Amino acid sequence: METVDDAVVNPGGPAAATAGDGRGTAAPAPRRRTRARATASMADVARLAGVSAQTVSRVSNGYPGVTEETRHQVLAAMKELGYRPNSAARALKRGEFRTIGVITFSLSTTGNVRTLEAIANSAAHEGYAVTLLPVAVPTQDEVRGAFTRLEELAVDAVIVIMEVHLLDAATVQLPPHVQVVVVDSDAGDRYTVVDTDQHGGTRAAVRHLLGLGHRTVWHLAGPEDSFAAQRRTDAWRAALIEAGRELPPLVRGDWSAESGHRAGLELAAREDCTAVFAANDQMALGLLRALHEHGRRVPEDVSVVGFDDIPEASSFLPPLTTLHQDFAEVGRLCVQAVLRKMRQEGPERGTTLVPARLVLRESTAPPPAGR
């Protein structure tokens, strides 16, 4: 609010009349009153910035297609005029909030973090914001509470990154009135699902090792409650059975390098272990350390394949052969799928799989002679 003097606003008012009454009486202090600052409009911003109102709208909504120079001009004009876009009014007018909610049960795994990053980038490219809601415990009450909180935060749709076994439980249901896309979960045909092809990637890893001449392939699996880990274990087992090879005992970790080291100590002590498929690169890193500590050379004595292709995988010693997950493509497809559902342009259900690509480096080779 601005304050102004009556003497200025109304030169002929009481202050002017008493200033020289000739009786030596001091003129009363000018009365002060408030006047509302004029509210700047989008048109005002457009005039000051020298652009169209449509350009101002694109900048305020975060749409792409505006040059940085123009964006800076518009933002400077907004600041100078004190213009604040009314997001609530825009949402009512459009019938949408241009915000996508994301529910995830873990931010500690590489896959979830990189998938979330890809979703956020893809959403921003489409002019949408992302509201993240981590859920500590995968129970029906927590899921229901998460959706309630996201509805209070006014989101248009929800992407669920649900790595743990949950959606296949009969007691857990997602709200039917919410547009939902599920990532990395055994949701079957009840939901729209986007996922890496866990099965196809694992088969490629096992076939690569068998093709090098290894009699069988050991598996360092992820945690039992993980859908991704279960998919990779099932595919490893199926590939060996299909090839008519012996199924070695399963060794399990928890995705961490520490658990890979612990399991690796067990595997390193087995002379019949010449090839290992690790369910992720972090466990493969711990496995490499355990093999080195036992004097087992990689790949001369033991070949190792990981899963994820984290940025550091090429810097392992030796550089790790692994399966590359295209997290950027998974994120993009999730956003595209949820936008199609919002616009009623796509199917209500169905699964889209993104291939996992085998990246050959220096951690795999034929087995030692006689093995």
Image (cartoon, grey):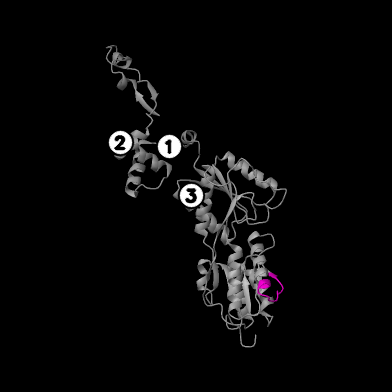
Left/right placement of residue 26 relative to residue 355 reads left
* Residue at the (53%, 58%) spot, across then down: 114
Q: Amino acid at mark 3?
A: Ala
Q: Which residue is mark 3?
A: 123
Q: As rendered, which of 168 and 294 lies closer to the eye? A: 168
As helix, strand or loop, the secondary structure at mark 1 comes to loop
Looking at the rendered image, the disc whose residue lies closer to the viewer, 1 or 3, is 3
Q: Is residue 312 visible?
A: yes
As helix, strand or loop, the secondary structure at mark 2 comes to helix
Q: Which residue is mark 1?
A: 85
Determine the CA span between mark 1 and mark 2.
16 Å
Q: Amino acid at mark 1?
A: Pro
Q: Amino acid at mark 2?
A: Arg
**In the image, residue 64 lies at what x, y percent?**
40, 47
Task: Place residue 204 in its image quadrant.
Answer: bottom right
Report the span colored magenta.
Answer: 240-251
Give the mark, 2 or 3, whose residue is nearer the N terminus.
2
**In the image, residue 133 lies at what x, y percent?**
59, 48
Residue furthest bottom as drawn = 370
User: Badge 3: few (under 14), some or many (20 or more) residues near its Cα, within 10 Å?
Assistant: many
Left/right placement of residue 91 relative to residue 3 reads right
Left/right placement of residue 73 relative to residue 306 reads left
Give the mark, 1 or 3, whose residue is nearer the N terminus.
1
User: Badge 1: few (under 14), some or many (20 or more) residues near its Cα, within 10 Å?
Assistant: some
Determine the CA span between mark 1 and mark 3.
20 Å
Query: Is the residue 55 above or below the residue 201 in the image?
Result: above
Q: State whether the magenta stretch is mostly helix, strand or loop.
A: loop
